[in-house]
Amino acid sequence: MKKTSLFGIACVVFAGGFASAGNYVLAIDGKKHEVEVGKQKNVELSDGKTIKVVLEKKAIVSFKAENLSFEHPSGVAPSRTEIRDGIQQTMMATPLGTLVLVQEYAKIDPAGLVDMMISQLTKEEKQRGYKITNSPAKTKLASGKTLTGRKSISTHKGEQTTRHVLCYSISDAGVMIITQIDNEAPPEDRSMVDVFWKTLNISLK
């Protein structure tokens, strides 16, 4: 496969988005206790009472931005950057190349950029002799909003990569969503993409 590019009784402070065991701190009554995910720890309270605590990580968590929200596996951390003024990008990628990329455009309708994006994504594959098949595509969200764009399938010597470049547009603004997955992608990669589409909500108005 190609490599393409969470004052009550307690407050949990995460040292690093999805850090490994031992990098979490549980604060109770103002006192911090180092904990490991999934492992029970005895914690003494200020009144001398000892309680047992276990820090667990949810399998599916939520991501929210100004114009959209979606759910994703907790083992994948979306990264968010400002490409330039008026364009925000959120990306999730796995080590095996499965990709979900969302670009929010505040000043232009991205629908006119779909063909150019497909061309850029498949440029190197074309040079290497891949067969590229493009076709119109659309998907309907649970909210009823419909995204339209293109589906691109790249095939070469048993390898196959499927990409979708889809847009939801309003006047002079919109959202472009790119997904990429190989035919050899493991179930967890496919689940990431499926959960994204099933839970994606676009609030752009």
Image (spheres, rainbow, N blue to C red):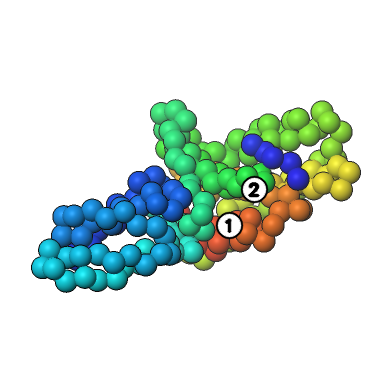
Tell me which corner region of the image, top left, top right, bottom left or bottom right, holds residue 140: bottom right
- Circle 1: element type: helix
Which residue is more in the foreground, 5 or 198? 5
Residue 132 point in image, percent of width and height: 81, 41
Which residue is more in the foreground, 152 or 46? 46
Q: Three-letter amino acid code at disc 1?
A: Met
Q: Residue at x 35, y 57 (%)?
A: 35
Question: Of the residues under marks 2 and 1, which one precedes in the sequence?
Answer: 2
Q: Three-letter amino acid code at disc 2?
A: Thr
Mark 1 lies on residue = 192
Spatial separation of the CA atoms under disc 2 and disc 1: 9 Å
Mark 2 lies on residue = 98
Give left or right: position of 81 versus 95. left
Residue 127 point in image, percent of width and height: 82, 28
Please rate how many residues cluster around mark 2, counting C-alpha atoms within 10 Å: few if below 14, some from 14 to 19, many from 20. many
Quick check: 11 above or below 17?
A: below
Which residue is more in the foreground, 11 or 54? 54
**Do we see residue 38 in this rendering?**
yes
**Do we see residue 172 in this rendering?**
no
- Circle 2: element type: loop
Looking at the image, do the residues carrying marks 2 and 1 touch, with CB atoms under 8 Å apart?
yes
Q: Residue at x 74, y 41 (%)?
A: 2
Give left or right: position of 30 versus 125. left
Q: Residue at x 60, y 35 (%)?
A: 113
Tell me which corner region of the image, top left, top right, bottom left or bottom right, holds residue 45: bottom left
Residue 172 point in image, percent of width and height: 46, 38
Residue 114 point in image, percent of width and height: 63, 39
Quick check: 37 above or below 182?
A: below
